[in-house]
Image: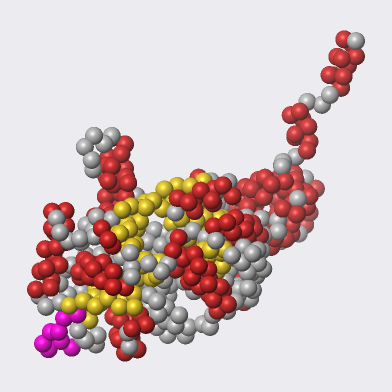
């Protein structure tokens, strides 16, 4: 009996060996291959730049055909650069990156063998090639939205990279250089070499061919990739259609009172996915490969899981990184339960209950005194629905809001509507401050400040825009917020959502007595960052009105995605922009809005850079 058991054990294959023979799990292949392809690309570039010939039959062929070696070096460098460009797409499971890698890996392996005689390089490329063929079903992601800007970015980055790599190629053969060329001559040799011409640097033997072919290959690669990106069909980002907007308005009419950010789903630079029943929806925008939703899903809470499932399916189809910014605690619980994602508290939203608001009392003394002083200076206020304004008044408000904007870029995404007084927005609210001044030549008349609110169900409103004339007295924002809160009962408004305060809890706890060293250090860092992002000033401004604080969360897949998501949020909110210089921007004609051609499932913090004037 024991001998038979021992025989069975000896005949068994160890589990570790079985795992190695089975290979990696299919879902891990894209990340593994993407990293390996990046390494192979670097090896290909090294093979072209740092050749090491050995005596072999191939070397004999190279002696008969002198152009063979330089051509292989250029092929190795070109394949390596292209593989580096494809590595990120392979990690994101892009189908087109898979197709290109299947072609480039054999070319890189051939160059490795012919020019450097690197057997390990050939084996690695062959293994990756086999993995790509075996697991091609893992690479099904559809293309991202794209435009001509990528061609310009590619040209700039590829040109800079080609010049840097070219300088390395020029200097990697010091013993073959004739004379002592300086940096200017070397740079000139690289630049003209990228265009296929001979430069001022001369080499002994066949090195000049190798350098010339390599530089020419880099220049041709830069030109071809730029031309491909410039002339390929555009895939514009999906946007709300008129039908989508109508459906969202129907959902908001029934369920808009649940979330103060619900109305911001009507931003027209967002796309939307609906639940199978049509009773819930998630709006989003794709920024730098991040599928960024904002706020809670719209509609019936019971239908949220269906909309969230559609959202995750769309993210998976395109290999986008899913993320949600500014969702409530209830929304965060549903998102994490349905998707397995994690949640991170971002800060708090300031909400004022109208029935509890009063200027009386010591805590409101500063606001009360500021408002009284401004009113004594001759300022008056009006709070009305947009539908009550004349077209002339609306044009004046729009023009003033545009002119008084503190930056060239309209900021806001998760808690900004991005428009004032357009068709369908008659239920929004506008608070304006006025003062008649003798000799005033302002094109906006006596208008001095504007606040714009969007509806929050039938009994609430949410602050969307704050703009003021820089020449007006300080405190315009406080004046208009107080006027809006005082006018709210006549407008049948019971609650008002003000600004979002990023990391408010950390700021509040860090300034209290007994706060620990870690919390104090975190608060000091936030105060330092407030020099650029107004983190502390927004908290202090909101606190003046004695609001209640409602936490808001970010939902994300894993911690390593947070830097990428954070960068995408900054782009969406308008803190990071890519635009033409003003000299050229004014000459561009606006392009008509086009429907996203690859959409197949559907037909953040509250504008952190408010123009707040703290007292």
Q: Tell me if residue 107 can be seen.
A: no
In the drawing, does residue 536 fall left or right of residue 378? right
In terms of depth relative to the viewer, which is nearer, 347 or 24? Answer: 347
Name the residue: 42% across, 78% down.
425
- Which image quarter is the C terminus in? bottom left
Identify whether 390 is placed above or below 401: below
Q: To which quarter of the image does residue 271 belong?
A: bottom right
Which color scheme is applied? secondary structure
Name the residue: 90% across, 10% down.
1
Prevailing SS of the magenta stretch: loop
In terms of depth relative to the viewer, which is nearer, 248 or 61? Answer: 248
Image coords of residue 315 (percent x, y): 61, 58
Q: Tell me if residue 130 can be seen.
A: yes
In terms of depth relative to the viewer, which is nearer, 320 or 385? Answer: 385
Total label count?
A: 0
- Magenta segment range? 434-441
Name the residue: 24% across, 85% down.
444
Q: To which quarter of the image does residue 483 belong?
A: bottom left
Residue 186 lies in the magenta-colored region: no
In the drawing, does residue 280 fall left or right of residue 388? right
């Amino acid at each position: 009996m024991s001998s038979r058991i021992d025989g069975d054990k000896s005949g068994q294959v160890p589990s570790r060996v079985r795992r190695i023979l089975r290979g990696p799990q299919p879902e891990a292949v894209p990340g593994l291959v993407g990293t390996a392809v990046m390494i192979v690309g670097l090896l290909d570039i090294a093979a072209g730049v740092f050749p090491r010939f050995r005596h072999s039959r191939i070397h004999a062929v190279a002696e008969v055909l002198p152009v063979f070696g330089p051509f292989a070096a250029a092929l190795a460098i070109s394949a390596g650069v292209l593989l580096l460009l494809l590595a990120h797409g392979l990690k994101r499971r892009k189908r087109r990156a898979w197709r290109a890698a299947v072609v480039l890996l054999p070319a890189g392996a051939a160059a490795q063998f012919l020019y450097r005689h690197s057997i390990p390089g050939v084996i690695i490329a062959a293994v990756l090639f086999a993995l790509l063929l075996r697991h091609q079903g893992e690479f099904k992601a559809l293309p991202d939205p794209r435009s001509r800007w990528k061609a310009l970015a590619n040209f700039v980055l590829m040109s800079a990279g080609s010049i840097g790599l070219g300088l390395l190629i020029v200097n990697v053969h010091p013993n073959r250089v004739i004379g002592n060329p300086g940096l200017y001559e070397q740079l000139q040799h690289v630049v003209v070499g990228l265009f296929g011409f001979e430069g001022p640097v001369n080499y002994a033997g066949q090195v000049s061919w190798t350098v010339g072919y390599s530089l020419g290959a880099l220049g041709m690669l830069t030109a071809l990739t730029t031309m491909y990106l410039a002339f390929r069909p555009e895939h514009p980002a999906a946007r709300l259609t008129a039908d989508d907007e109508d459906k969202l308005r129907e959902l908001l009419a029934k369920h808009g009172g649940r979330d103060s950010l619900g109305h911001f789903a009507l931003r027209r630079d967002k796309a939307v996915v609906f639940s199978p029943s049509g009773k819930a929806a998630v709006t989003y925008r794709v920024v730098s490969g991040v599928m960024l939703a904002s706020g809670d899903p719209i509609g019936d809470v019971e239908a949220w899981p269906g909309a969230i499932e559609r959202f995750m399916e769309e993210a998976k189809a395109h290999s986008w990184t899913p993320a949600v910014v500014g969702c409530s605690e209830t929304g965060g619980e549903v998102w994490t339960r349905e998707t397995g994602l994690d949640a991170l508290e971002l800060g708090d939203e300031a909400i004022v209950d109208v029935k509890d608001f009063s200027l009386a009392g010591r805590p409101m003394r500063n606001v009360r005194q500021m408002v009284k002083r401004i009113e004594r200076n001759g300022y008056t206020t009006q709070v009305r629905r947009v539908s009550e304004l004349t077209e002339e008044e609306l044009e004046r408000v729009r023009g003033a809001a545009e002119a008084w904007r503190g930056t060239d870029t309209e900021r806001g995404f998760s808690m900004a509507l991005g428009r004032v007084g357009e068709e369908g927005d008659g239920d929004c609210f506008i608070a304006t401050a006025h003062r008649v001044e003798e000799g005033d030549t302002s094109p906006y008349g006596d208008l001095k400040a504007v606040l714009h609110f969007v509806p929050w169900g039938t009994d609430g409103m949410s602050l969307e825009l704050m703009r003021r004339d820089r020449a007006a007295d300080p405190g315009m924002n406080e004046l208009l917020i107080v006027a809006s809160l005082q006018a709210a009962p006549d407008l049948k408004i019971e609650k008002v959502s003000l600004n979002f305060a990023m990391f408010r809890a950390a700021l509040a706890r860090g300034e209290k007595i007994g706060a620990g060293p870690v919390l104090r250090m975190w608060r000091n860092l936030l105060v330092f960052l407030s020099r650029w992002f107004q983190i502390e000033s927004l908290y202090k401004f909101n606190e003046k009105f004695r609001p209640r604080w409602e936490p808001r969360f970010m939902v994300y897949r894993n911690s390593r995605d947070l830097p990428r998501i954070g960068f995408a949020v900054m782009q969406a909110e308008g803190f990071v922009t890519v635009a033409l210089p003003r000299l050229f921007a004014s000459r561009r004609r606006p392009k008509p809005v086009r429907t996203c051609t690859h959409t197949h499932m559907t037909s953040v913090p509250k504008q952190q850079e408010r123009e707040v004037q703290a007292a």
